[in-house]
């Protein structure tokens, strides 16, 4: 069996109808397919075969998506491969296809000089641990909206012109981290596209900024989920003490009448700006990494104690693949 690219057309025809119930959320199949094509056809998705799989007697028996990312650590750049949407149709399960696919992906990436693979597991992590992936802390943080600052925030809807200011805020927090996923211009473009896409039915996007002259003091990218009485914050950032001081008020403005604000446990720097909140363990999207080069093994040895004991988690939702 050979690892082969799966064309977008084949993927839309054969795989998406089967995974729609699992990962489509509230989107209908057409919207789910359109969202897939938006990534697959973007410059980011086209840098390498985005969807790959194994064929057995010409039938596609298992497949996944591959994302190219970089991780910066001190002065080094580690080349990372994100693996998403591992899927075997029910009638082919339990025959070792997905395990073979992942083992072949790891071998191929190692041979191509890449340093680590990562994924977000929605199943029991033991399946991926057998293949060499290590689970990292994957939590969420919930705040009561009533505990937030109800002062006037001065928040306005995020616009395209805010992009440089948002990126500046992001960098200010990001530089304090010992290591992180790099946001190249291409990655930023992809993330911005996701943040500004129309939300799923019954969800509302609230992306807010507080500006000072032409600059951005603080931003929040979030989804209002009224059915769950919750604001789900995907990302936030701020510049300086002025920005940090307005964080609570911008969350409150975004939450409006919703009772709770929930987010993935933010990375260092951002986490420290939030004093309150109840942490809980995530049951899905468990962040896992597999170091496959000597440089990545050094990275893991140097950072593992800190990563496993930290109050903060390593990745933002935007790094989810
Ligand atoms: C998980 C999945 C990809 C495995 O595909 P597969 O080709 O059957 O995998 P393999 O044959 O290599 O391995 C089978 C083993 O996977 C493990 N496995 C399957 N589902 C699992 C789950 N929900 N949690 C943990 N392990 C699981 C079991 O150990 C299973 O062994 P068993 O058949 O002896 O019980 C397949 O079940 C699937 O497509 N599930 C739905 C999509 C999904 O959840 N994908 C993972 C996203 S992170």
Image: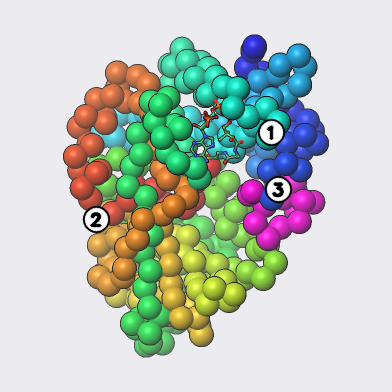
Residue displayed at 35% across by 60% down: 280
Could you tell me which secondary element the residue under label 3 belongs to? helix
- 169 shown above or below 106: below
Is 59 left, or right, of 313 in this rendering? Answer: right
Query: What residue is at 43 percent from the left and 72 percent from the top?
Result: 261
**Ligand 1 under 8 Å from disc 1 Cβ:** yes
Cα gap from disc 1 to disc 3, whole angstroms: 12 Å
Q: Residues within 10 Å of mark 2 (few under 14, many from 20)?
A: some
Dividing the image into four quarters, tell me where ligand 1 lies. top right
Which residue is label 1 attached to?
Answer: 89
At 65% from the left and 24% from the top, the residue drawn is: 53
Give the position of the N terminus as an image quadrant.
top right
Q: Are marks 1 and 2 in contact (CB under 8 Å)?
A: no
Which is closer to the viewer, label 1 or label 2? 1
The number of callouts visible is 3
Q: Which residue is mark 2?
A: 311
- What residue would you read off at disc 3? 20
- Magenta-colored stretch includes residue 203: no
Q: Earlier in the sequence, mark 1 or mark 3?
A: 3
Mark closer to the observer (2, 3): 3
Q: Is residue 184 above or below residue 142?
A: above
Q: Secondary structure at mark 2?
A: loop
Tell me: 3 left or right of 183: right
User: Dot 3, crowdedness within 10 Å: few (<14), some or many (≥20)?
Assistant: some
Q: Compare marks 1 and 2 and give the one earlier in the sequence.
A: 1
Contact between marks 1 and 3 (CB within 8 A): the answer is no
Q: Where's residue 263, x and y in %?
A: 42, 63
Observer-nearest residue: 118 or 274? 118
Range shown magenta = 22-33
Q: Marks 1/2: CA distance?
A: 38 Å
SS class of the residue under badge 1?
Answer: loop
């Amino acid at each position: 069996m050979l690892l082969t690219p799966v064309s977008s057309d084949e993927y839309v025809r054969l795989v998406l109808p089967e995974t729609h119930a699992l990962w489509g959320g509230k989107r209908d199949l057409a919207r789910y397919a359109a969202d897939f094509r938006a990534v697959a056809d973007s410059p980011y998705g086209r840098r390498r075969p985005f969807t790959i799989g194994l064929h057995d007697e010409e039938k596609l028996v298992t497949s996944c998506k591959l994302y190219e990312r970089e991780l910066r650590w001190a002065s080094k750049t580690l080349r990372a491969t994100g693996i998403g949407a591992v899927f075997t149709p029910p009638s082919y399960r339990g025959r070792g296809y997905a395990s073979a696919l992942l083992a072949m992906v790891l071998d191929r990436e190692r041979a191509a000089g890449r340093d680590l693979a990562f994924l977000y597991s929605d199943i029991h992590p033991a399946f991926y641990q057998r293949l060499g992936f290590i689970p990292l802390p994957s939590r969420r943080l919930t705040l009561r909206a009533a505990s937030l600052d109800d002062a006037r925030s001065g928040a306005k809807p995020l616009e395209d012109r805010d992009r440089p200011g948002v990126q500046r805020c992001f960098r200010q927090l990001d530089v304090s981290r010992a290591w992180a996923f790099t946001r190249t211009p291409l990655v930023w473009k992809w993330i911005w596209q996701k943040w500004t896409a129309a939300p799923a039915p019954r969800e509302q996007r609230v992306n807010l900024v507080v500006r000072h002259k032409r600059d951005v003091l603080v931003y929040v990218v979030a989804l209002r989920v009224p059915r769950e009485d919750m604001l789900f914050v995907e990302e936030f950032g701020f510049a300086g003490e002025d920005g940090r001081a307005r964080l609570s008020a911008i969350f409150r403005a975004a939450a409006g009448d919703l009772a709770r604000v929930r987010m993935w446990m933010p990375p260092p720097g951002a986490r420290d700006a939030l004093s309150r909140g109840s942490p809980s363990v995530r049951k899905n999207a468990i962040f896992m990494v597999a170091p496959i080069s000597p440089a990545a093994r050094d990275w893991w040895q140097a950072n593992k104690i800190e990563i496993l004991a930290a109050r903060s988690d390593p990745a933002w939702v935007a790094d989810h693949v």
